[in-house]
Amino acid sequence: MSTTAITDNSFRFLFEDADVRGETVTLHHVLNDLYAAHSYGDGVKRLLGEFAAATVVISNNLKFKGRVVLQGHSDGPVSLVMVECSSEGQVRGLAKGQLDAPQGPLSSLLPSGVLTLTIEPETGQRYQGVIAAQRDELCDVLSDYFEQSEQLATKFWLSTESGVAAALMLQQLPKQVVSDETVRFDQWQTLCALADTVTGRELIAVGTDQLLYRLFNEWTVKRFEPKGIVFECNCSSERSLNAIRLLPKHEITELFEEQETVTMNCEMCSKSYSYSLSDVRPEEEPTLH
């Protein structure tokens, strides 16, 4: 079920004189749809927005059809925050726990938390990586994770403000343009230092072309065509009905003895589906003789 008519965009770009690539994304309508399913407070809205922006830029690494799922788990105020993004740019997500939790560092919302990144191709092997969320900012946790797991230097910048979330990511590529390790290291350090000058407000309010010029105007940057991002929930009446049908027969009987109509609510988009016993077991529908 899609609720977004206007797409938000992500952009890929490449430094032509360095083995470094980048991604940007700005989410507005998508973020509003993510927020609409539950009554989130400012702290959880900020956290969910950063997870959403980060998941989108990570998903742009996919070279196959599938999806990326980024989750945070903890015993703290936020027990779960989860966002998934498909290779087609379809996003959905939610948070659980104290939904009115105030704004604060990641360590206060997900104390002793664990971050899980799952890559699920439509065909092929599923990959999952886990890292402790022991930093105050999600961008730092993700930067640490990618450097450890991919062995490619990667850095994230994230911002959420006034119903808009944005991300910037830089990643060093394997040797292609520059072979000298000292030069490669210096280029990476310089580009990251330039990106470090970006403010959260700039990340959200400044268009991609203008942002890239402000940060990297002395470098040759190639920006590729934008990719549209939409809120899309893959729930359906049939999926919810099948979830009921999977229950043991006696539980289904008890369920409909208590109520004539059973309603299933999707946690991701808040859409409701209602069923009668005849929907679950068509063979039990009364017939006239």
Image: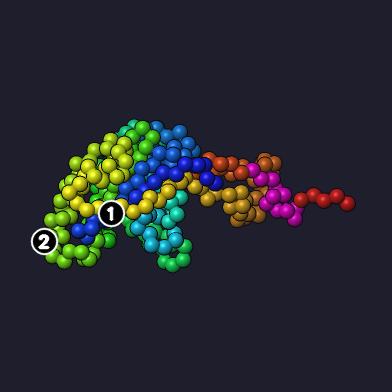
Dot 1, how many residues are within 10 Å of its Cα: few (below 14), some (14-19), or many (20+)?
Answer: few
The local secondary structure at tag 2 comes to helix
Q: What x and y, as percent, mark residue 205?
A: 31, 36
Q: What x and y, as percent, mark residue 232?
A: 49, 47
Task: Say if the magenta span includes residue 59.
Answer: no
Work out whether residue 24 or residue 214 is closer to the camera in this orientation and state it.
Answer: 214
Dot 2, how many residues are within 10 Å of its Cα: few (below 14), some (14-19), or many (20+)?
Answer: few
Report the residue at 35% width, 46% height from top. 25
Mark toward the start of the polypeptide (2 vs 1): 2
Labels 2, 1: front one:
1
- Please give the residue where the numbered disc 2 appears in the rendered image: 182
Work out whether residue 47 or residue 177 is closer to the camera in this orientation and state it.
Answer: 177
- Please give the residue where the numbered disc 1 appears in the rendered image: 222
Left or right: residue 57 versus residue 184 is right
Q: Which residues are magenta?
A: 274-284
Q: Amino acid at mark 2?
A: Thr
Work out whether residue 178 or residue 125 is closer to the camera in this orientation and state it.
Answer: 178
The local secondary structure at tag 1 comes to strand
Q: Amino acid at mark 1?
A: Lys
Work out whether residue 83 or residue 106 is closer to the camera in this orientation and state it.
Answer: 83
Report the residue at 25% width, 52% height from top. 221
Disc number for residue 49 = none
Q: What x and y, as percent, mark residue 233?
A: 51, 47
Q: Is residue 138 above or below residue 59?
A: above
Farthest right residue? 289
Left or right: residue 36 versus residue 202 is right
Q: What x and y, as percent, mark residue 273?
A: 61, 44
Q: Is residue 117 above or below residue 174?
A: above
Q: Main secondary structure of the magenta part?
A: helix
